[in-house]
Amino acid sequence: MKRFWREMPALLFLLATFGIALWVLTDDRDAIPLHFNIRGEVDSWGEAWSVVWLPLIALALYGLLTLLQHRPQWCNYPGKLIDKERAYRQMSHIVCRIKTLVMCLMLYITLCVAQVVDSNIFVVLAIVAAIIFVTITGWSRIDTEP
């Protein structure tokens, strides 16, 4: 049951990404923003159907990260593991947190493309910094031989 609740935020972000993309498709829009500059201004427009790519990319990332979460032995570890079972469990938790943050990032990008929220580079950088922080702090807890 614990695993179910740990997965829920990432799954909800993924479903929301699909929902927003569907809303954009049914909204009779001629064009959607495809690219934003560093100030958050739209500098490229495209057809509305191209919003479909965002949830598909999010779904692919969700699937790959879920696979990696269930196969932590495939991860690259910083040294020889002392307690493999404990290290694999910790890596599974790290990948789960990274998956949630990646799905949050994909949802934010979809919201920006749907023009529900204004694009802000600091939000994107904060989520990327959180992913880096989770990775570094998680790896530092894994016991390896020198």
Image: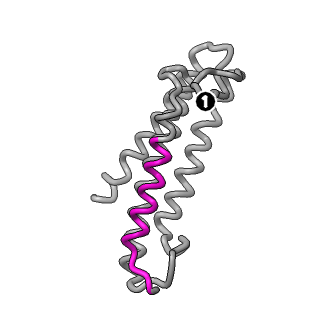
SS for callout 1: loop
Q: Is residue 87 left or right of residue 78?
A: left
> What count of labels does the image hold?
1
Instruction: Look at the image and give the residue range highlighted in magenta.
Output: 126-145
Assess whether residue 51 is covered by the magenta stretch.
no
Q: Is residue 55 above or below residue 65?
A: above
Q: Position of residue 120 (x, y in %)?
A: 51, 28
Q: Position of residue 127 (x, y in %)?
A: 46, 43
Amino acid type of disc 1?
Ile
- Snapshot quadrant of residue 142: bottom left
- Snapshot quadrant of residue 2: bottom left
> In which quadrant of the rendered image does the N terminus lie?
bottom left
Q: Residue at x 67, y 25 (%)?
A: 49
Q: Nearer the viewer, residue 82 or 110?
A: 82
Q: Is residue 38 left or right of residue 12?
A: right
Q: Which residue is mark 1?
A: 38
Q: Residue at x 48, y 34 (%)?
A: 122
Q: Is residue 122 left or right of residue 85?
A: right
